[in-house]
Amino acid sequence: MLSTVISLKDVSKKYIMGGDTVFYALKNVNLEIKEGEYAAIVGPSGSGKSTLMHIIGLLDKPTDGKVIIGNKDISSLDDDATSTLRSEFVGFVFQQFNLLNKLTIKENILLPIGYARKKFDYNPEERAEYLMERFGILDKKDSFPNKISGGQQQRVAIARSLIMKPKLILADEPTGNLDTKTGNEIMELFGELNKEGITILVVTHEPDIAERTRRQIKIKDGEVVK
Amino acid sequence: MTYLGSILKSAITDFGKNKGRTFLTSLGILIGVMSVVLLMAAGAGLKVYISQQFESMGSNLLYVMPGNMFGEGGSGLSGADGGMAPLFVEKDIVTLKRLKGAEYVIPYYQKTVKASYVGTTKYATLNGTSEDAFPGNNFIAEYGTVFSSADNSAKNKVAVIGSNLAEKLFKDGSLAIGKKIRIDDQLFRVIGVLESKGGGGLGGPSFDDYIFIPYKTAYIFNTDKKFIQITVKAKTEEDLPVLKEEIMTELKKRIKTDEFSVVESTEILNTIGSIFSILNIVLVAIAAISLVVGGIGILNIMYVTVSERIKEIGVRRALGARRNDILWQFLAEAVVLSVFGGAMGLGLSATVVLFLRSFFPAYISWQSIALALGTSSVIGVVFGVFPAKKAADLSPIDAIRYE
């Protein structure tokens, strides 16, 4: 029996729009991500998938419902505790890579380490070297992000998301800024990582991309439609 | 690397990428720190300079002056004859000379005169004084000799002149001895030229431009036979208080208490010192305004930096940075910026002070170094905290979505 990485119970996110109008970005979402899953949250823009991703990524909190990680409802955690949990629980991969241009590739990959509050049972430097070697970017370790290609930048971002050995990789439109060939390479990389047991959740509006994962969570108007 | 080390490194790396902006932003602090440090250095130097001037005149001196306060209208020290009317007479000199603790009694009659020799005419300060003036003031004849009490009693028309005046009139001091100079309409024989005492410049003629003649001879000019000041040198420092009392007692027999005063050189030094300190504090306070202006420059640029880096803040938050991590990061940048300006200001001040030292003993004290670096860090914190708070309070989602 695989353990649950994160589960959402009746999660809603609503905004009071002025007057009595209430807008539901998410409505009664129930969702469970198991360890080792490779899933996609798919839906058109404005469907609420970004909000869902922010809640799963611990960047946002629901207005109703529970978010459970390791049998604990984390909605009640304060900002500092949430930040610390975020650093250990989730690794982000973004559409725009979001690397810091003034840091070298290696420094970018090691950036989350500086914010970690845990003791490491491995050497982060060595892990960074290993990830760079594995992703074919070791020769770029002292380069800066704006000096390398988009595909390489996304590999750096994936390495950065893995440096903390998080429970979940959350990839927001990871191929959106890449050409088809490079996008495919990135998706293949996710496939390989998943085979090694890493839990990956891809957020996308492209059905093609979603189909490359093993489970599609369709979302429309703030509700999960399966 | 420690947490502090890493945020400092990150702040410094950041400025490395933005050299021009960093320099311009810290320019305000640079100018502020520089003006404060320089004014403090100059103030400290001037104080040293003034006490050196006093020391060169000798210690254990009591100044007997008209009026019940010194300072106003010139004390007579630097030869200003304005303000107080001459008050003392020959009898006072004789009386004071008889006091046990008095080693030298030096009366002064002062007058600005025209001194000329073979067509060269210079303005000079004439002093009608006693032979005690020379040992009492540590005046030593470089050429010739100083006048004696016999010259005074005989009203000999002899003059001892300062080195500077001698050079002006005779090109070389040694040529002056035995020559007759015309002082206003009287002819005097130069018998001595004094060694240079330096100084002057600060609000009065230098001793090097003085002419000394026996006070009895000076009655040609001093028709009232009155003296503006009598300086009494005590035999020892221990004699000073008693001597001061005795002088008061003696003079009170003739003059009303509030018409004259007896002041120790240290009192004058302290008064000048405290006037300088107050003046210096005021100047430093004015200079400190530029530090505040510099701080506002930092405040401004830090707000710009935060707005430019909203996305970065979002990324850092997504990677696990806490609110305080962001706060410290931007605060560290503000402090580094400010201390960088402070350090450069200090460096430039040191250069200027080195240059100033050829004129007077200006120096940068440890206190002013600590003050400069301390103030600039405080300014960094005070003016950095608002932008840093703004950065820390950004919502992670808004920040990461920011384009």
Image (cartoon, coloured by chain):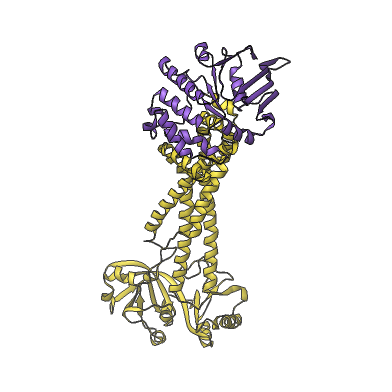
Chain colours: A purple, B yellow
Q: Is residue B125 above or below residue A187?
A: below
Q: Residue furthest front?
A: A1
Residue placed most toward the observer, B278 or B3: B3
Q: Is residue B236 above or below residue B260?
A: below
Q: Is residue B34 left or right of residue B117?
A: right
Q: Is residue B403 above or below residue B14?
A: above
- Residue drawn at 50 percent across, 11 percent down: A208
Q: Quadrant of the N terminus of chain A?
A: top right
- Residue drawn at 49 percent across, 56 percent down: B368
Q: Is residue B183 left or right of residue B332?
A: left
Query: How many numbered circles does the render carry?
Result: 0
Residue A103 showing in the rendered view: no
Q: Residue furthest right?
A: A20
Residue placed most toward the observer, B106 or A167: A167
Residue B9: x and y in percent read 46, 42
Residue B17: x and y in percent read 41, 36
- Residue drawn at 48 percent across, 61 percent down: B44
The image quadrant of residue B182 is bottom left
Residue B311 showing in the rendered view: yes
- Residue drawn at 55 percent across, 66 percent down: B271
The image quadrant of residue B186 is bottom left
Residue B298: x and y in percent read 51, 40
Q: Quadrant of the C terminus of chain A?
A: top right
Q: Is residue A78 left or right of residue A91?
A: right
Q: Is residue B373 above or below residue B365?
A: above
Residue B115: x and y in percent read 34, 70
Residue placed most toward the observer, B235 or B97: B235
